[in-house]
Image (cartoon, rainbow, N blue to C red):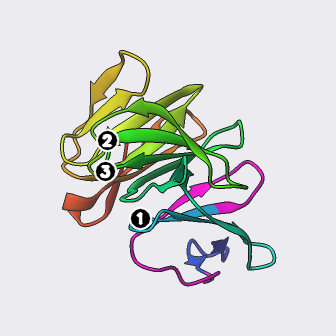
């Protein structure tokens, strides 16, 4: 996204993704793209417009699939939620090898780090659950499709039932 100086923006297409792809952005500047159905993970370099690495997310050789939620941790690992297992996995982006990190009702929504805590936003309940913690809170969103943390610490939420409206909490 480039700002054109007249209050508008210019969007530049970097690549075309398959439907059902979910994104996370790492501190390293790479985009981590997970194909929901297959569990394939791509490390995409937006500067060269190239795929640096592509691996299958797996636990002990078993593919992890049905992934609607992705977050990149400050530790460099990719965290994904599987709707097939209702488990959150910690994934090595170089090998695809994963381990169970926690559990939650993964029915869409998103994963987001707030400080050191990983939160699962449940799509249909408008509720956030702290993974491996007791915290939870509700927001007035009918369908959470994505979440980002703003520089001031507030959450920017894509509310799918309100025609793509973004709300700040």
Prevailing secondary structure class for the magenta stretch in the rendered image: loop
Tell me the quarter of the picture where residue 16 sits: bottom right
Q: Write the residue at 23% across / 45% down.
A: 141
Indicate whether 9 appears above or below 32: below
Image quarter of the N terminus: bottom right
Image: magenta residue range: 12-31
Image height of 13 relative to 123, above or below: below
Q: Residue furthest right?
A: 48
Tell me whether circle 3 and circle 2 mark residues in contact (CB < 8 Å). Answer: yes
| Residue 62 in view | yes
The quadrant of the rendering that contains the C terminus is: top left
Question: Residue 49 got which mark?
Answer: none
Left or right of 43 in this view: 168: left
* Label placed on residue 36: 1
Considering only order in the chain, which callout, 3 or 1, is on the residue closer to the N terminus? 1
Circle 2 residue = 86
Q: Element under label 3? A: loop
Q: Residue at x 40, y 56 (%)?
A: 67
């Amino acid at each position: 996204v480039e700002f054109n100086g007249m209050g508008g923006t210019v969007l530049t297409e970097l690549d075309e993704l398959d439907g059902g792809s979910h994104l996370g952005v790492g501190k390293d500047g790479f985009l981590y793209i997970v194909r929901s159905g297959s569990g394939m993970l791509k490390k995409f370099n937006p500067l060269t417009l190239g795929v640096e690495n592509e691996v299958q997310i797996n636990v002990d050789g078993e593919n992890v699939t049905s992934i609607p939620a992705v977050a990149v941790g400050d530790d460099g690992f990719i965290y994904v939620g599987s709707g097939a297992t209702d488990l959150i996995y910690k994934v090595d982006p170089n090998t695809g090898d994963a381990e169970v990190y926690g559990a939650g009702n993964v029915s869409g929504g998103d994963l987001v780090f707030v400080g050191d805590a990983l939160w699962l936003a449940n799509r249909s309940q408008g509720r956030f659950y702290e993974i491996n913690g007791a915290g939870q809170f509700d927001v007035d969103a009918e369908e959470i499709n994505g979440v980002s943390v703003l520089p001031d610490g507030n959450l920017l939420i894509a509310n799918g039932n309100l025609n793509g409206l973004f709300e700040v909490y």
